[in-house]
C-alpha cells in the first residue's frame, strides 16, 4: 500500500496547485458560500471520474500516440477559459455602479435567483474540469507512472488511483472554497466583490493565453 500513500501525497500537492478549477472554486466560495460550493465540487469530480474511466479504457495510449488529439483538447480548453473569463469581465463591467448587487450574481456574473445557485455552480465546475488539459495530462501522464502490471489488472489499478486522486481533489477544493468563504463572511462591499470578479476574469483570460502559447 506504500505506492498509494506516495501517490496520495503527490496528488494532494498537484490538486492544491493554483489552476482553472481552483480559481473557479475560489470564485464560487466568495459568491455562494461553503454549502453550494462544496456540492458544486461534485461537477468537477464527475468530470474527473469520466477521465479516469477513459484512461482505464485505454485513452492514455491513444493520446500518447496522437498529437492531434492532445491539440484538440488543448484548444477546447483555451476556448472555454477565454469564454468564461471574458463573460465574467463583460458582466461585471456592464453592471457598473448601479448594477445588480453582488449577492445576486452567479459564478459567471449573470443574475441567479437567491438561494438557487447550485445548478450554475455544478455546470461551471464540470465544464472547466472536462475542458482542462492539465487534468487530462494528470490522468494520462502522471497517474500511469504509478501503475505496475505486476500488481494486478491495470484497469483495476487505474480505478483505485483515480479514486485516490478524486479524494485529493476534493480536499484541495475544500481548502480553496473554505478560504474564500471565510473572506466572504467578512462582508466585503459590492465594489470589492466586483473587483474580485474582474480579477478572476482577468486571470482566466491570462490562463487561456498561456495555454494557447504553450507547446502542445
Image (cartoon, rainbow, N blue to C red):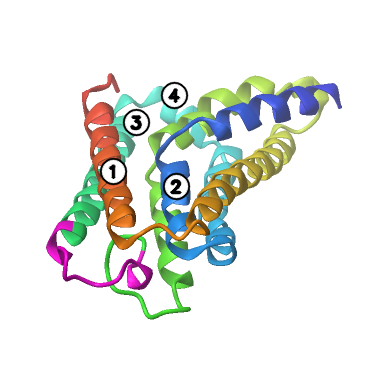
The correct choice, above or below, for 33 with respect to 83 in the image is: below
Other residues around mark 2 within 10 Å, as few (<14) / some (14–19) / many (≥20):
many
Front disc: 3 or 1: 1
The residue indicated by pointer 1 is: 199
Q: Residue at x 28, y 63 (%)?
A: 109
Query: Which of the 4 quarters of the picture holds residue 123?
Result: bottom left
The residue indicated by pointer 4 is: 64
The correct choice, above or below, for 184 with respect to 12 in the image is: below
Instruction: Specify the label residue 70 is tagged with.
Output: 3
Q: Earlier in the sequence, mark 4 or mark 3?
A: 4
Badges 2 and 4: C-beta atoms under 8 Å apart?
A: no
Query: Is any part of residue 56 visible from this angle?
Result: yes
Cα separation between marks 2 and 3: 16 Å
The residue indicated by pointer 2 is: 129
Other residues around mark 3 within 10 Å, as few (<14) / some (14–19) / many (≥20):
some
Front disc: 1 or 2: 1
Q: Which residues are magenta?
A: 93-106
Residue 117 x/y as whole percent: 44, 72
Cα separation between marks 3 and 1: 29 Å
* Relative depth, front residue between 38 and 48: 38
Magenta highlight on residue 69: no
Q: Earlier in the sequence, mark 2 or mark 4?
A: 4
Amino acid at each position: 500500500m506504500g505506492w498509494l500513500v506516495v501517490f496520495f501525497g503527490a496528488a494532494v500537492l498537484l490538486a492544491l496547485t493554483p489552476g482553472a478549477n481552483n480559481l473557479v472554486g475560489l470564485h464560487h466560495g466568495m459568491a455562494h458560500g461553503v454549502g453550494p460550493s462544496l456540492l458544486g465540487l461534485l461537477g468537477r469530480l464527475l468530470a474527473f471520474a469520466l477521465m479516469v474511466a477513459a484512461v482505464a479504457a485505454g485513452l492514455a495510449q491513444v493520446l500518447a500516440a496522437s498529437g492531434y488529439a492532445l491539440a484538440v483538447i488543448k484548444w477546447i480548453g483555451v476556448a472555454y477559459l477565454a469564454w468564461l473569463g471574458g463573460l465574467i469581465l463583460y458582466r461585471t463591467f456592464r453592471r457598473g455602479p448601479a448594477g445588480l448587487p453582488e449577492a445576486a450574481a452567479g459564478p459567471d456574473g449573470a443574475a441567479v435567483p437567491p438561494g438557487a445557485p447550485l445548478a450554475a455552480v455544478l455546470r461551471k465546475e464540470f465544464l472547466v474540469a472536462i475542458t482542462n488539459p492539465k487534468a487530462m495530462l494528470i490522468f494520462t501522464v502522471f497517474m500511469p507512472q504509478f501503475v505496475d502490471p505486476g500488481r494486478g489488472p491495470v484497469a483495476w489499478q487505474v480505478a483505485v488511483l483515480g479514486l485516490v486522486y478524486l479524494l485529493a481533489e476534493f480536499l484541495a477544493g475544500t481548502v480553496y472554497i473554505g478560504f474564500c468563504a471565510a473572506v466572504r463572511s467578512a462582508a466585503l462591499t459590492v465594489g470589492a466583490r466586483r473587483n474580485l470578479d474582474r480579477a478572476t476574469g482577468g486571470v482566466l483570460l491570462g490562463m487561456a493565453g498561456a495555454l494557447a502559447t504553450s507547446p502542445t
